[in-house]
Amino acid sequence: MSKRLLLVDDDVDMCTELERMLEKRGFEVETTTSADKALELIDETDFDAVITDLKMRGMNGVELCDRIVQNRRNLPVIVVTGFGTLETAIATLRAGAADFLTKPFNAEQLVVSIERAMRQAALEEEVRRLRIDAGERRGYEEITGASPLMQRVFQMIDRVASTEATVLVTGESGTGKELVARAIHNNSKRAGGPVVAINCAALPETLLESELFGHARGAFTDAKVSRTGLFVDASGGTLFLDEIGDMPLGVQAKLLRAIEDRKVRPLGGGAEVTFDARIVCATSKDIETEVVEKRFREDLFYRINVVHIELPPLRSRGDDVLTLAQMFTARFAKRHGKNVGGLSPAAAEKLLSYSWPGNVRELQNSIERAVALTEFNEITVDDLPPKIRDYKSSHVLLAGSDPTELVTLEEVERRYIQRVMEAVSWNKSDATRVLGIDRSTLYRKLDRYGIGPTHSGKS
């Protein structure tokens, strides 16, 4: 799509030259030699940017820029002049100009300036829209986003919530798996019952078994009283088994029997106890790999994987990053009693370019830090954590005109493997297919290069 520009200069020859230069580069250009006429055209036509000369008869470029900015904040203005001084540059930028160029300049300098100004204007508009729409989020409570990937997640929640099917939620750490479990519960006929959650990776085997199935008095040291266990406690509601991929094999066998029979036998107890709880499981591991490598029971995997909901990593969700950032900004500004309305466009651009190895949890922590530290009514780049401010992409450089940008073959391999792992959301089965190597080779290379989700973004 061509971008529509308005070119303002009382030098007809200069207008013609710049018009020809910009049209060759795909822009649609309209010209005028009068600042007053330019204001009329802006009222009648949607332009993407204005390029104006500084020295003109009548209204000059600074005055024109000031008028445009007052009435059309989202329309970037670039001022050009053959008489550039520090004073005129300062006056131009104070008037709200997106950029200030001194003649002579080449075509590429002007194009870069125009594209940067339009990109900045688009970010500013998006930030303003997010501030307006912060209270009208699309999603389930804190699970929000308009990206196609998240819309599919919402559709799956809609379809499965009204059923009693066991659900397996997968995704990287910090993507919001427990929030999905609670959304399923809250939109089900069990919404009036309890949601009981346990992290299967946080407890040793004996204690985990006792927590899940209960125990009789005297079943082990310190078992001074009997307790029913979480399966029974969750009756009438939902039992959420987080990080089930880390559950010990011995407990997995008992879990399978409990799910199939809808009964549990407490440790040290003789009688089985029935329960009525829906089961939702979650894991950040590649569960199919765990099955292949005999660390997770295949029969249990098929039993819990009746409905599978996969949460995408934050880096795959596009502008959802800004939607979530705005939501967190409003929340923490209220909590900390600060007048912080949102993000600066430059901060928004940094958030969009970062790879978010810690996903939504990392974004939430970063925004809380920024709200706490900022001295302004919006979050700036300086308020963001250093790793976000200084982030460099892991994109592979295959060619370049600058010899200093070229890297060793080993470094190319490291970056490419990193890039593939990010693209497949760290699913090792998919990565081996893309890379054309076996699983043991992949593990060896990941270990050799120190590649993992927490290393994302290192160059």
Image (cartoon, grey):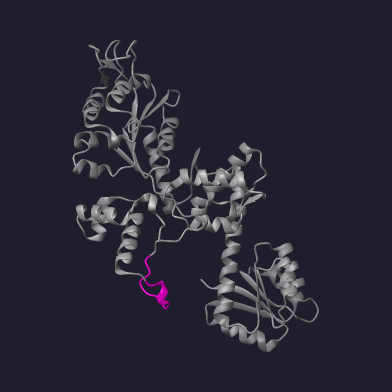
Q: Nearer the viewer, residue 26 or 396?
A: 396
- Looking at the picture, does residue 220 appear above or below residue 313? above
Q: Is residue 366 left or right of residue 305?
A: right
Q: Residue at x 61, y 78 (%)?
A: 29
The residue positioned farthest toward the bottom in the image shown: 13
Find residue 362 and report its horizontal and vertical position in percent: 47, 45
Identify the image quadrant of residue 124.
bottom right
Task: Assign the magenta stretch its main secondary structure.
Answer: loop
Find residue 53 and report its horizontal and vertical position in percent: 70, 79
Whether 400 is among the magenta residues is yes
Q: Residue at x 65, y 66 (%)?
A: 75
Whether 297 is among the magenta residues is no
Q: Residue at x 53, y 73 (%)?
A: 2
Identify the image quadrant of residue 47.
bottom right
Q: Is residue 368 left or right of residue 168?
A: right
Find residue 436 and report its horizontal and vertical position in percent: 22, 60
Q: Nearer the viewer, residue 339 or 445?
A: 445
Q: Residue at x 72, y 70 (%)?
A: 90
- Looking at the picture, does residue 277 appear above or below residue 359? above
Q: Is residue 404 left or right of residue 82?
A: left
Find residue 199 and report its horizontal and vertical position in percent: 36, 31
Residue 327 visible? The answer is no
Q: Is residue 16 left or right of residue 430?
A: right
What range of the chain is rendered magenta? 396-406
